[in-house]
Image (cartoon, helix red, strand yellow):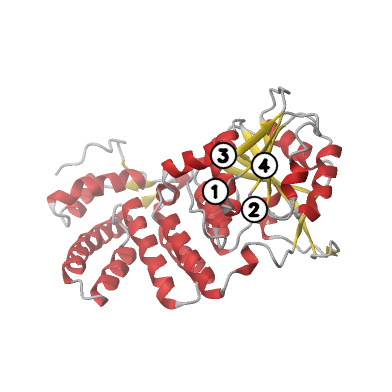
Amino acid sequence: MNQNLIEILRKERLILENDLKSDSKLTVYVGIYNGVKFLDGIQSFLNTSTLRDFKLVIVDNSSTDGSWGVLMNWVDTFGVPTRVVRNPINLGGSGGFGLNKDLLQTEWVTAIHQDDRYETNHLETLYTAALRSSSEVLAVSTEMGSMREDGSTILAIARPIWLADSTSKANFFLANLRTHLVPWGSTIFKTREFLSIELPWHSTAFPDTELLLRLCAKGKFINLPVQTMSYRENLVSESHGLSGDEKDLAIVAALSRVFASPEFIDIARTVDAEKRPDFYQAVKLGIALRLKRAELRSVAELIAEESLLIAWNYTNPELVGEVSSRYSEMGSNRVSELLDSILAHVGEFETGRKKLIAQAQPKESGDLLIPERRALNSVLKVFPYSQRRKFLKALLWLKVRTKKNHPNDFRW
């Protein structure tokens, strides 16, 4: 959104606040829109929370059901530094949060959803774990239960996040590409990283997952095996009112932004070379699970493939060939010819690498030992001169060494 418009809307919002001060590193954000029937539950939770040291920001998204009349009396209710804000217009959930992110100035932030149910230890459990976590952790979540619209409990089932590999950024990205794992409503985030990613405000189809996929590059996620809240299956919420076509369009747009982002390229660069073909196929599988329409799937796949070409410097033959075929099918001979030329050099690279491995002798700890230095020289002859430096780098990556341990003593 145009920054000038943001500045205008921020000047037009109404902010009520108390004079209390706190050094807490946590801000609790509560977004409200026509939620008057849920306000008693939110007030009860905030009054009985076992954590009593946090900053509170409550935002009314220009409700029309009388919610503001209740919220404006909450400024001095909870005994913590509190700001109660009324937006000049309804901006949707994402827009209401985005407009007021200038008020989130602590190290950590978490959101309370108006129609969900929270246990009294919810904030304390999240905040305590966040403070104890290492510097590379950017999010901590607890278990999230489910309940029907009438508040009755839905039996909890096993959750995929219990088995997800959160130690690897690439694996965690792939797992969340297939299905959203992190329980958004029961998660605390590092504010700086969370706010560093800009998303469109207007669609509710995929914003949580889009943000999560890009955050995978910025740090680690921790899930605590304790349930502290329950998500309400609200059939009139923003996301439930979307048509199938609108969801598909929003998802392909969101995935396109994800795959074109520097975060995706950073994640791809963490993948070891021998695992890159598997990563590429796993990305395609994740896209297929998200998008059933072939024409939309092809768009997301092409953007992902081109970003992988950037991340991996065009060294994956299957990937180069796939992108070349896509352009060729569209009649773009120039692009396909250029990619085919690159593919030919990549093929020579792979041939030379395989010859080298075939001639090498295994050594303890998995290293490769070249019996004769002249064997390496003979392999290098299959490469054009311009490609030999790249091949040498590949040798270092493969941890190839001569008998005398002189990896730089290679004759051209």
Q: Please, what is the three-letter code of the amino acid marked with disc 4?
A: Thr
Q: Residue at x 79, y 31 (%)?
A: 76
Q: Of the residues tagged 2 and 4, which is closer to the observer?
A: 4
Secondary structure beneath dot 3 equals helix
Q: Which of disc 4 and disc 2 is earlier in sequence? A: 4
Q: State left or right for residue 296 relative to residue 215.
A: left
**CA distance for labels 2 and 4:** 13 Å
Marks 4,3: beta carbons within 8 A: no
Q: Please, what is the three-letter code of the amino acid marked with disc 3?
A: Lys
Q: Which mark is residue 101?
A: 3
Q: Residue at x 69, y 66 (%)?
A: 236
**CA distance for labels 4 and 1:** 24 Å
Q: Of the residues tagged 3 and 1, which is closer to the observer?
A: 3
Q: Quadrant of the C terminus?
A: top left
Q: How busy is the neighbourhood of tag 2: few (under 14 within 10 Å), some, or many (20 plus)?
A: many
Residue bearing mark 1:
168
Q: Is residue 142 visible?
A: no
Please name whichever residue, 213 or 59, is drawn nearer the observer in this view of the structure. Answer: 59
Q: State left or right for residue 310 relative to residue 120.
A: left
Q: How busy is the neighbourhood of tag 1: few (under 14 within 10 Å), some, or many (20 plus)?
A: some
Marks 3,1: beta carbons within 8 A: no
Please name whichever residue, 311 or 59, is drawn nearer the observer in this view of the structure. Answer: 59
Please state the horizontal and vertical placement of residue 240, each as a whole percent of the image: 65, 67
Q: State left or right for residue 152 relative to residue 388.
A: right
Q: Which mark is residue 182?
A: 2
Q: In this picture, is 30 found above or below 27?
A: below
Please state the horizontal and vertical placement of residue 308, each as a whole percent of the image: 36, 56
Secondary structure beneath dot 4 equals strand
Q: How busy is the neighbourhood of tag 4: few (under 14 within 10 Å), some, or many (20 plus)?
A: many
Q: Of the residues tagged 4 and 3, which is closer to the observer?
A: 3
Q: Please, what is the three-letter code of the amino acid marked with disc 1?
A: Ser
Q: How busy is the neighbourhood of tag 3: few (under 14 within 10 Å), some, or many (20 plus)?
A: some
